[in-house]
Amino acid sequence: MTASETPVESLSFEAARDELVKVVAELEQGAPTLEQSLALWERGEALATRCEDWLLGAKRRLDAARPAASEDES
């Protein structure tokens, strides 16, 4: 299974980010066909969403930890 065949939902933040960088580079170089460009674009959108989901999850975890840390200091 190649990177572009791996389900986006199973990727770690780092794997999704790294693949997104490659997709953007391929798009910048220009795919040979419109269909390939569209497939790259769709994969890139899914990867960007996956990265955003990871970051939002990390923010929620940090936000949840802050009140607990403040209560421990009191």
Image: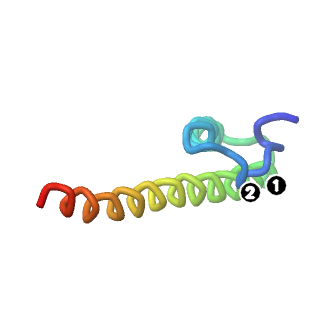
Q: Quadrant of residue 46?
A: bottom right
Establish if 6 lies above or below 22: below
Residue extending furthest toward the right: 1
Residue 17, percent from left and from top: 55, 41
The quarter of the rendered structure image containing the N terminus is top right
Label 2, secondary structure: give it: helix
Amino acid at the residue labelled 2: Leu
Picture quarter with the C terminus: bottom left
Q: Residue 50 at what x, y percent from top left?
A: 60, 56
Quick check: 36 left or right of 17? right
| Residue drawn at the location 41% of the way across and 58% of the way down | 61
Judged left or right of residue 50, residue 62 is left
Kind of residue sitting beneath label 1: Glu
Which residue is at 24% across, 56% downward?
69
The residue singled out by tag 2 in the image is 38
Question: Which of the numbered marks, if any, corresponds to residue 35?
Answer: 1
> SS for tag 1?
helix
Work out whether residue 37 or residue 15 is closer to the camera in this orientation and state it: 15
Rate crowding at label 2 as few (under 14), some (14 to 19) or many (20 or more) other CA atoms within 10 Å.
few
The image quarter in which residue 64 lies: bottom left
- Give yes or no for contact between labels 1 and 2 (Cβ–Cβ under 8 Å): yes
Mark carried by residue 14 = none
Q: Residue furthest left?
A: 74
- Identified at 64% across, 38% down, the residue is 19
Residue under the point 83% across and 34% down: 2
